[in-house]
Image (cartoon, grey):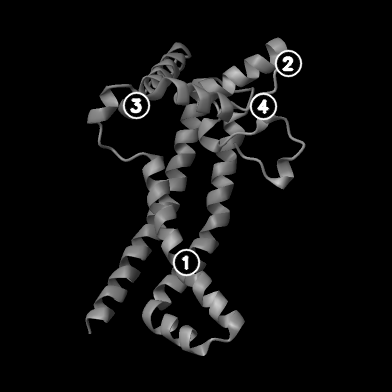
């Protein structure tokens, strides 16, 4: 579970990753806290459930979560329905996030190497990186410029998930709309990333 210095005095019940917020583990942790005063992180509940029940536990997790959502009037998408999602090929926001962070990590590694070389005043490495991978350095700066907007959109999603004034169906509708905005930032970056990578590839052929 998340456990940074800033969360040192935060109850375990409140320590969880974004993906776990609003799931049955989050609700179970809340119930344990209210019913018997047990301070347990939702991530701990998820870990032990999946560790001791394996794949079957993960399927039960998916099935129970889907059933809970349907009972609250939510219309499920194919990717959220157990069994049906195996044949579902549409990309989700998680796929877009993963692609973005993989691309960003590649650019970040080059940018960090460039920064280290500047710190050491290593002109040989600096010149080589500028000559071979200048696009990656620029892409890292571009990702940094997008990160504030992306984080703001994800913070809004978190606020909606934690809101007491919205039904589950209303939360999902609003979050889906924000995810479309979030996705546009990822696609925008990935389009530029592909163009810049293609430039590097062509240059290396010369």
Between discs 4 and 2, the one toward the N terminus: 4
Q: Position of residue 128 (x, y in %)?
A: 42, 84
Instruction: For marks 3 and 4, give the CA distance.
Output: 29 Å
- Per the image, the residue denoted by label 3 is 77
Q: Nearer the viewer, residue 68 or 180?
A: 68
Give the answer, above or below, for where 139 lies relative to 8.
Answer: below
Farthest-out residue, right? 9
- Quarter of the image with the C terminus is bottom left
Query: What SS does tag 1 mark?
Result: helix
Between discs 2 and 1, the one toward the N terminus: 2
Q: Residue 56 — which label? A: none
Give the answer, above or below, for where 203 lies relative to 174.
Answer: below
Give the answer, above or below, for where 131 lies relative to 82.
Answer: below
Query: What SS does tag 3 mark?
Result: loop
- Per the image, the residue denoted by label 4 is 13
User: Taking 154 as reference, is 177 left or right?
Assistant: left
Q: Nearer the viewer, residue 57 or 174?
A: 57
Between discs 3 and 2, the one toward the N terminus: 2
Instruction: For marks 2 and 1, give the CA distance.
Output: 45 Å
The residue shown at (73%, 15%) is 37
Instruction: For marks 4 and 2, give the CA distance.
Output: 10 Å
Q: Position of residue 83 (x, y in %)?
A: 27, 22
Between discs 3 and 1, the one toward the N terminus: 3
Q: Residue 37 — which label? A: 2
- Per the image, the residue denoted by label 1 is 109
Instruction: For marks 3 and 2, give the CA distance.
Output: 36 Å
Would you call the spot at circle 3 few (<14 residues within 10 Å), some (14-19), or many (20 or more)?
few
Farthest-out residue, front? 52
Would you call the spot at circle 4 few (<14 residues within 10 Å), some (14-19), or many (20 or more)?
some
* Contact? badges 4 and 2 (CB < 8 Å): no
């Amino acid at each position: 579970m998340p456990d940074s210095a800033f969360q040192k005095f935060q109850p375990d019940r409140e320590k969880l990753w974004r993906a776990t917020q609003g799931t049955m583990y989050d609700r179970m942790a809340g119930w344990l806290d209210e019913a018997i005063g047990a301070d347990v992180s939702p991530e701990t509940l998820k870990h032990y459930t999946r560790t001791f029940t394996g794949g079957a536990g993960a399927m039960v997790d998916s099935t129970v979560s889907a059933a809970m959502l349907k009972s609250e009037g939510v219309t499920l998408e194919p990717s959220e329905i157990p069994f049906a999602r195996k044949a579902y090929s549409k990309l989700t926001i998680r796929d877009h996030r993963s692609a973005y962070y993989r691309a960003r990590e590649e650019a970040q590694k080059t940018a960090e190497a460039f920064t280290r070389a500047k710190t050491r005043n290593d002109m040989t490495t600096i010149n080589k990186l500028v000559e071979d991978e200048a696009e990656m350095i620029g892409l890292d700066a571009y990702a940094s410029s997008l990160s504030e907007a992306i984080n703001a959109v994800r913070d809004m999603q978190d606020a909606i998930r934690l809101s007491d004034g919205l039904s589950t169906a209303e939360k999902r509708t609003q979050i889906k709309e924000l995810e479309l905005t979030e996705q546009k930032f990822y696609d925008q970056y990935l389009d530029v990333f592909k163009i810049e990578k293609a430039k590097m590839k062509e240059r290396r052929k010369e």
